[in-house]
Image: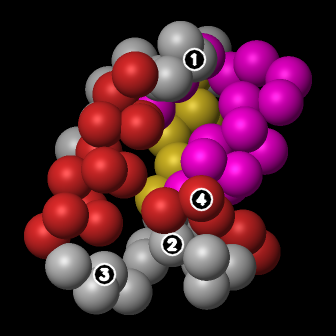
C-alpha cells in the first residue's frame, strides 16, 4: 500500500518483476482507499524459494513510495 501517486503501480510492478520474472502486471489488483489518498496493490506470484520471498519483501519495504507491506 502506498500513496495514490502517478507511477506507483508501475513502479511496484517493475520491482516485483525483478524478483518474480514470470509476474504478469495485468493480474495486479488495485483498490483505492475510501478517500482516494492511498492505493492498495495485490501482486500474486509463484514463489520458488523462501529466499526469493525474503528478497521481494525487502525490496518492497525499502521502496520509498511503499507505506505498508503485508
Q: Is residue 50 left or right of residue 36?
A: left
Q: Give the extent of the magenta segment.
A: 1-16
Residue at which label 4 appears: 18
Q: Is residue 66 left or right of residue 9?
A: left
Gap between marks 3 and 4 measured at Cα = 13 Å
Residue at which label 2 appears: 20
Residue at which label 1 appears: 65
Coordinates of residue 11 in the picture (x, y in percent):
72, 38
CB under 8 Å between callouts 1 and 3? no
Q: Is residue 67 left or right of residue 18?
A: left
As drawn, 21 above or below 56: below
Q: Nearer the viewer, mark 3 or mark 4?
A: 4
* Count of numbered tags: 4
Check the image and name the residue furthest to the right: 6
In the rendered structure, which disc, 2 or 3, sits on the residue that comes first in sequence? 2
Gap between marks 1 and 3 measured at Cα = 24 Å
CB under 8 Å between callouts 4 and 2? no
Coordinates of residue 27 in the picture (x, y in percent):
65, 77
The quadrant of the image that shows the N terminus is top left
Coordinates of residue 70 in the picture (x, y in percent):
23, 44
Mark 1 neighbour density, 10 Å: few (under 14) some (14–19) many (20 or more): some
- In the image, 32 versus 41, the foreground residue is 41
Coordinates of residue 19 in the picture (x, y in percent):
49, 62
Q: Nearer the viewer, mark 1 or mark 3?
A: 3
When asked about the image quadrant of residue 35, the answer is top right
In the rendered structure, which disc, 1 or 2, sits on the residue that comes first in sequence? 2
Q: Secondary structure at mark 2?
A: loop
Which residue occupies 72% across, 69% down?
Answer: 25
Q: Is residue 37 visible?
A: yes
The magenta stretch spans residue 60: no
Which residue occupies 61% across, 85% down?
Answer: 22
Residue at which label 3 appears: 47
Amino acid at each position: 500500500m502506498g500513496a495514490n501517486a502517478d507511477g506507483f503501480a508501475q513502479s511496484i510492478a517493475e520491482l516485483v518483476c525483478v524478483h518474480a520474472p514470470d509476474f504478469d502486471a495485468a493480474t495486479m489488483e488495485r483498490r483505492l482507499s475510501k478517500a482516494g489518498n492511498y492505493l492498495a496493490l495485490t501482486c500474486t506470484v509463484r514463489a520458488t524459494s523462501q529466499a526469493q520471498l525474503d528478497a521481494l519483501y525487502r525490496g518492497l519495504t525499502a521502496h520509498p513510495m511503499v507505506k505498508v507491506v503485508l
